[in-house]
Image (cartoon, helix red, strand yellow):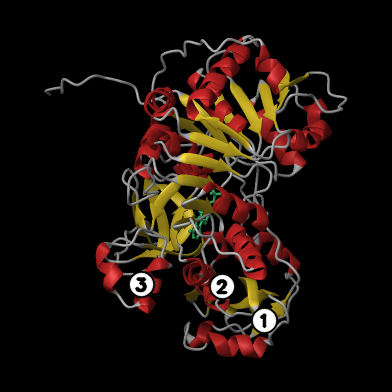
Amino acid sequence: MLLGQMMEMPLTITAIMRHAERVHQDGHISSITVDNPGHRITYGDAFARARRLANALQELGLQRGDRIATLMWNDYRHFEAYYAISCSGYVCHTINPRLFPEQLEYIVNHAEDRALLVDPTLLPLVERIADKLPTLRQIIVAGGAVPDSALPNLVAWEDFIGGASEDFRFPALDEREASSLCYTSGTTGNPKGVLYSHRSTVLHAMACASPDVLGIGSSDSVLPVVPMFHVNAWSTPYAAPMLGSNLIFPGPKMGDGETLAKLINGHGVSFALGVPTIWLGLLTWCRENDVTLEPLERVGVGGAACPLAIMDEFRERHGVHVQQGWGMTEMSPVGTFNVPRKALADLPLDNARQVQVLQGRTIFTVEMKITDDDNNELPWDNEAVGRLKVRGPGVCSGYYRLEDSETHDAEGWFDTGDVAAITPDGNLRITDRTKDVIKSGGEWISSIDLENAVMAHPAVAEAAVIGISHPKWTERPLMIVVAAGEAPSGEELRGFLKGKVADWWIPEDVVFVDELPHGATGKVSKLELRKQFKDYEAS
Ligand code: AMP
């Protein structure tokens, strides 16, 4: 073997920070926080504060690899915590505040978090379970003062770093060391921890930073409405400073259409990322208030299938191109991204829309395949539908402190739990979660395709389709709809679906509800819907 003669520089988050401090120190972060709705800081100053935080954390007597939790919204302090914690050799354990208290308790204890950085608005969640969290030594509350609380070990963030120096020598790290931890919000069983490394984080951020993925640069202002508390805000806290893009953070106002519209127009946001429900809220607010999103050029959407109706409204009303991505906690999280090839620009709009609604091609570093139940690989012909499996340096090889992982096969491929087809040119088309698949008369019906088709109806705000048992067909789809304004009849919706999906897919049963249940990451909870409709009798 002849080894190359190149420098062995470890791929660490510290290297991203060093690069950004040198070349993009004037790039900035704008945030809404509880103590300041219009905060702005340069990357240079944010990293200086991160070094003060690192100094203060060191005083807690922590060991390398210790877990430090964050329970925070997207803002500059959370950004500083990402870097101070990981670059010090500790593990930044981001916690989703929308989890149930029992799950929060389980997660903090399973990770054995030593300290917690928390937004004041989220402190009540901690107070409820604090006596059951024996490993937590220190709670640091974002802001300049500690709110009224009976908890003994609280300190205000600004006091905590107040006396700390800006000089801090971050340790030399092995690129394989753990950098961050995020628990999946699985619908069954306990949440499972995905432990990212410095190397996986840097490679993933570099892959995301390329033009055919996030496609951002130093002239962009990026609004991640995807949370930093779940799956690293799709790499934006790393990719943006790496490239010098400004970051615009909505703080606790993530779900507020008016705030998002004002941030976009007020800060010249060119690229925004979020789950479909966030965009539904923003589009509705803009429509009702006759506002257009002038500076916005592109929107990245993922986390759940994006209905064409959202893409169409962004294009028609705001001149914005929507790009769908797919991924999951176990994948850092981005797996695919849909950036159209140049040839598509010449296609008639209707054909281009059919491509736009796909989940896109894999980013470099991710490999994917689809298999049947016996693990035979299926062709990429957009027809064969099978289990979607992936591998790559940004894909988890197991779960934190969990001996057996049934999700990895003998060759190390990770079974995503998604069901998909792949087009001959490598575009992913997710049809379902394995657990949500509807099998009718021995054939599969895609709930996602049905939802997508019906959400194009102007009187439908949101829709979900689940399987209900049927004496003849084993299962039939039940369509559950939230109307936008006055509800159309089930018959009208059935008529609307004709020609858009196979006739035998069209649900006999359509019910209307006031709202759909959403889980901690903004996805419609089909588990909850199946519970709600378990006694529903198919007609
Ligand atoms: P999470 O680990 O919480 O990020 O959830 C990952 C899951 O969300 C995936 O396994 C998919 O089931 C779903 N998902 C993510 N993005 C998409 C998408 N663009 N279309 C359909 N499902 C998606």
Which of the image's four quarters has the N terminus? top left
SS at circle 1: strand
Amino acid marked by disc 3: Ala
* Between discs 2 and 1, the one toward the N terminus: 2
| 350 on left or right of 8 | right
* Between discs 3 and 1, the one toward the N terminus: 3
Q: Label 3 belongs to which residue?
A: 352
Q: Based on the displayed image, in which of its 4 quarters is residue 174 positioned?
A: top left
Label 2 CB sits under 8 Å from any ligand 1 atom: no
In three-dimensional space, the C-alpha distance between marks 3 and 1, rounded to whole angstroms, equals: 30 Å
Which disc number belongs to residue 41? Answer: none
In three-dimensional space, the C-alpha distance between marks 2 and 3, rounded to whole angstroms, equals: 20 Å
Q: Label 2 belongs to which residue?
A: 451
- Decide: is 111 above or below 209: above
- Camera-nearest residue between 145 and 421: 145
Amino acid marked by disc 2: Glu
Q: Residue 402: in sight, yes or no?
A: no
The residue under the point 50% across, 88% down is 503
Crowd class of label 2 (few under 14; some 14 to 19; many from 20; radius 10 Å)? many
Crowd class of label 1 (few under 14; some 14 to 19; many from 20; radius 10 Å)? some
Label 3 CB sits under 8 Å from any ligand 1 atom: no
Q: Based on the displayed image, in which of its 4 quarters is residue 513 positioned?
A: bottom right
- Camera-nearest residue between 147 and 221: 221
Q: Label 1 belongs to which residue?
A: 510
Which of the image's four quarters has the C terminus? bottom right
SS at circle 3: helix
| 483 on left or right of 434 | right
Q: Residue 174: in sight, yes or no?
A: yes
- Camera-nearest residue between 410 and 107: 107
Amino acid marked by disc 1: Val
| 35 on left or right of 46 | right
